[in-house]
Image (cartoon, helix red, strand yellow):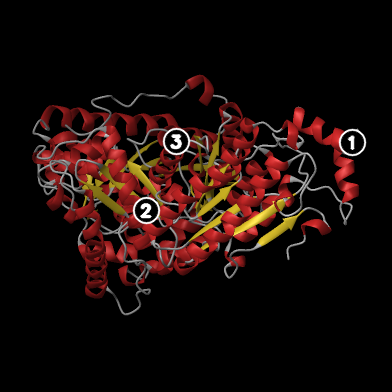
Amino acid sequence: MLETNRGARLANLWDDAKASTMRESERLLYRSNLLGSDKRITNYGGGNTSAKVMETDPLGAGEVEVLWVKGSGGDVGTIRMDGFATLYMDKLNALKGLYRGIAHEDEMVGYLPHCTFNLNPRAASIDTPLHAYVPNKHVDHMHPDAIIAIAAAKNSRELTQRIFGDDIGWLPWKRPGYELGLWLEKFCLENPGARGVVLESHGLFTWGDTAKECYETTIEIINKAIAWFEENNTAPAFGGAVKPVLSANERRAIAEKLMPVIRGMIGRDEKKVGHFDDGEAVLDFVTSKNLAPLAALGTSCPDHFLRTKIRPLVIDFDPAAPDIEKTLAGLSNAIAAYRADYAAYYERCRRDNSPAMRDPNAVVYLVPGVGMITFAKDKATARISGEFYVNAINVMRGASGVSDYVGLPEQEAFDIEYWLLEEAKLQRMPKPKSLAGRIALVTGGAGGIGKATADRLMAEGACVVLADIDEAALAAAENELVGRYGRDVVRSVSMNVTDEALVARSFADTLVEFGGLDILVSNAGLASSAVIEETTLELWNKNIGILATGYFLVSREAFRIFRKQKAGGNVVFVASKNGLAASPGASAYCTAKAAEIHLARCLALEGASEQIRVNVVNPDAVLRGSKIWTGEWKEQRAATYKTDDLEAHYRERSMLKLSVFPEDIAEAIYFLASDMSAKSTGNIINVDAGNAQSFTR
């Protein structure tokens, strides 16, 4: 059966009361968001919607017809009004007189800006002619799994006729562009009773005279396809299961071992972030008889292909007799073979003016009995690439269950991947941020310094795992950062740094969530104050446990990962000026901080040959936002220094007469974690507003 939420039909979400208060362009937005809210209709960034609307011409030409169409690179599920391009229909129609034929197809994209209505800065997409030349006022172009399963079948045209009759037409494969727009117009004029068309290996176009009619037609046609597959696709999926599915814990354990090793092998030129998916559709595919031959065919829909590459890499792993060490040992040859195969594909298909070959590594890695791993330049792209491959799996399930599945022809796939227009779009992308593709774990992540550090690293493009023992504060910190940067780039783990097993599990969770580790910020802390006679063994051990043993435990796990990745690494300890300069009434704290600093020096020596850098930031008196500067500790230090205003005391004590804030410490940590300090290890940066006692010697 086609995987469509196991038989669930798409709901008609149209609300007449809500839509009745909207302008025509607003109803387009409403329709787009409804369609994009369900991945069975189209995936993130896929599909397109349009409406032809009468607008007042700002040049005084009265009422003119304007095409509102999703702009280049937008997503129908999240689009807002400023995401639509607007173009004069009369100018779009005039372009027909400039078209010089299929050999000059791409030059038509250059004319689209000349058709812009009202100086709209949103760039029109390559799909614009496909919407412009359909005579109806409203057009949807979606990529539903159920429809692409028809479009990707060997007898696609016959299936379309059998399922839909003359209601929905069929057009052979044609790369999106101006020529396809003219094909659609011709089809509509010759078939005035049709309500849509299936494009071979591509997707679905539907239309209507109102926004509601267009939306309901789209839902109806997709549901009809779902129902047909339910009735006719009853064979075991992908030839049936021939491998067992490992338990959830076993699957995560295998992913944890594979992901950092793969990441290290494919991320030497550009850091990558991973995503793991062991959902039902994926497991059905990676345990099936036809996994290898179907995976080799690649994807069919161009939207799928652009996200997932020509084909996935199937990892050599047997869940019936799991031997992960054997699999790990074979990864280097498997990845090298994939690169060689990709280079051969490039050489076979390249044109005289093709862009240079891009990253030859796979995006999608399929592990029998375990799941799917995807790697990309950031977490969102890795996740979305995985979602697109799940769409491809669903398409293969449907097409191979009722016919033969047909992937996109190799030359067509290449011409899309290395399309000059696509290359131009890539060249316009903003320069990656300094920590793009980096993964960091911050202990004490819910406190003032930890949260400020996570914020600073994420602002530069890093994914961050917050680790803290205070679960309530941890949840609050995570929610705050998710609100600022999105769900993809932040995770949290409850961690007591003195618990060896919990530390190991937290790092394992990090590997499964993001694929590896680049930066450890060891920041977990406490504060204590007692003269030596009143320092209990319990207090002494607590300081040593958190500030020395805890730093050892998290560093050991980080080093293990860094060495698996073989791509260097970065450790930053947050110590204290008290590690260099003694303070009265704090022997346990000062001693533990001194041990922490010396541990960093030892680790800098151990890691240097493998490009693992270890440095230290020494704060002093960071009161704002700190969890340790509350209650008893603050009172004790105030009593020691005989002051009612501890922050003022520390400010006046400093050489620069300045207060030190969490953001100041975060800035120093960012410097040491970034490539700006690429030639620094074993160093200490004091961020204490100046304290002669803590000058390093």
Q: Residue 431's spot in the image, x, y percent?
A: 55, 63
Mark-to-mark CA distance, 3 and 2? 19 Å
Mark-to-mark CA distance, 1 and 2? 49 Å
For residue 48, which quarter of the picture? Answer: top left
Query: Which residue is label 2 attached to?
Result: 260
Packing grade of label 1 (10 A; few <14, some 14-19, many >=20) is few
Q: Residue 432's spot in the image, x, y percent?
A: 54, 61
Q: Nearer the viewer, residue 609 or 451?
A: 609
Which quadrant is home to the C terminus?
A: bottom right
Query: Which residue is label 1 attached to?
Result: 645
Packing grade of label 3 (10 A; few <14, some 14-19, many >=20) is some
- Residues at discs 3 and 1 in contact (Cβ within 8 Å): no
Q: Nearer the viewer, residue 39 or 316?
A: 316
Is 146 on the left or on the right of 444, as rendered?
Answer: left
Q: Earlier in the sequence, mark 1 or mark 2?
A: 2
Q: Nearer the viewer, residue 29 or 365?
A: 365
Q: Residue at x 67, y 31 (%)?
A: 536
Q: Residue at x 86, y 52 (%)?
A: 654
Nearest-to-viewer mark from 3 and 2: 3
Q: Which mark is residue 502?
A: 3
Is 238 on the left or on the right of 215, as rendered?
Answer: left
**Residue 306 visible to the viewer:** no
- Residues at discs 1 and 2 in contact (Cβ within 8 Å): no
